[in-house]
Image (cartoon, rainbow, N blue to C red):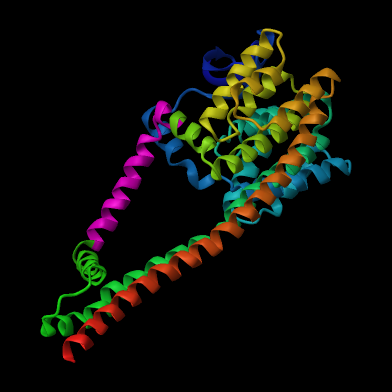
Amino acid sequence: MAEWRYEAIDRAGRAINGVMEGADEAAVLQRLRRDGALPLSVVPAGGGMWGALGGALGGGDALTSQEVTNITRELATMLGAGQDLDRALRFLVETAPNRRAHRVLDALREEVRNGASFAVALGNHKRSFSALYVGLVRAGEAGGTLAPALERLADLMEKERALTATVKSAMIYPTLLTLAAIGAVTLLLVQVLPQFVPLFEQSGAALPPSTQFLISAGDAVSHYGLWALLGLLMAGVAIRAALQQPAARLGFDRLKLRLPVIGGLSREILAARLSRTLGTLLDNRVSLITALTITRDVVGNAAGTEAIDRATASARGGDGLSASLAGSGLFPPRLVHLLRLGEETAQLGPMALRAAAIHEESVRIATQRLVALLTPAITIGMGLVIAGIVSSLLLAMLSLNDLAQ
C-alpha cells in the first residue's frame, strides 16, 4: 500500500488535506468520494527533501494565465466539435507554443491515458491550474458537460484578465507622469539650483526664506538622496513582509476598502470578482457551499475573504447568503440586492453573472474617472512645484539687484 497526499472539499464545504494509504490513485479517489468529499488533487506522498526542493523550484513548468486561457479555449472548441479528450490533448501537445507548455500538456495527457480523470490530472499541476479551475472541470466531468464547462471557464479567465488589465493599463500614464515630475524637481534641485549658490554666497545678501529652503533641500537630496531611496526600498520590503501576516493583511485590506476614492474602486473590483466566480461555478452545477469555498480564494482581499467565510457559515446554517454579505458592509448595495433577488427566484447563478457584468462596467467607468482626476492633478502639482522653485530663484536674483543698486 502506497501513501497518497490529497486535497479535497468536504461535505461542509471546508478545504481539507492529508495523507491516505491506498493501492493506487483510483482507490484513494473512490474512498474520498465515498466519504462525501470532492477531491481536488491526489499525488504520491513520497519525495523527501529533494522532492520538496523540486516542488519549490518547480516554477519553471508553471503556465502563465494567458497560456492557460488559450489552452482552455482551444480544448473547449475541440471537445465541442466532437473530438475525444485524448485527441484534443494530443493536438495541444503537438501545437504547444513552448517547451514549458509542451511538458505540462504532455504530462496531463499521460495521466489521463493512465486512467486518471482530467480534473485529477489538472490538480497535480497546481502551479498552473487553480482550485477554481479544477473544481469547474470536475463539475463538468461529473455532469457530462466538459466542453461547456471549459467554455465558461475560458470566459471567466478572459473577464478576470480584462478586469485586471483595465486597472493596470489605466494607471500606467499617471505613474509615468509622477515619475517625470519627481525627476524634473530633482534635476532642478540637484543640477540647476547649485549653479546659483556661488553667486548668492559671493553677494553676501540675505536670501529669501523660500530660496534658503530650496538650497537646503538641494543639499539634502545631493548628499542623502540615494540613502533615502534605499531606505524607502527597505521600508517597502518590510511592509510587504509584514502584510504576509494574516492580522496585518486583514487590517490593510479593510483600510483599502474604506479610503475615499480608492475604496470605492476596490469594492467594485471585489464585487465583480465575487459575482463572476460565484455565478460561473453555480452555472456549472457546483453546490453553493463548495462554490463559496472556492470563491474565497479568488477575491484577493482578506476582508472580503473573511466576509465570504461568514456568508458560507450562514448559508451552511440555512440562512441567506445576501443577508450575511450585506451585514459585512463591504459590498455594494447593488450586488446584495441582485443576490437577494437571485435567492428569492432560485436564479442565484444567473443573477450573480448579471451583477458581475454591472460591476465590471462600474470598474471600467470608475477607473476612467480616477485617471481623469489624477492626470490633471499631477500636472498641476508639478507645475506649481516648478513655478515655486523658479519664483524663489527670481526673488533671490531681485534681492541681488536691489543690493547692487
Dominant SS in magenta = helix
Q: In the figure, residue 322 lies in which quadrant?
A: top right
Q: Is residue 15 left or right of residue 69?
A: left
Image position, residue 56 (x, y; %):
43, 37
Which residue is the extreme one toward the bottom?
405
- The residue located at (15%, 75%) in the rendering is 206
Q: Is residue 165 visible?
A: no
Residue at point 60%, 43% (across, down): 265
Picture residue at 22% right of the left edge, 58% below the top: 227
Q: Which residues are magenta?
A: 225-249
Query: Which image quadrant: the C terminus?
Result: bottom left
Nearer the observer, 184 or 25:
184
Residue at 76 percent across and 43 percent down: it is: 155
In the rendered image, residue 233 lying in the magenta stretch gets the answer yes
Magenta segment includes 161: no
Splitting the image into 4 quarters, where does residue 335 fall?
top right
On the image, the x and y values in percent for residue 297 come to 58, 30
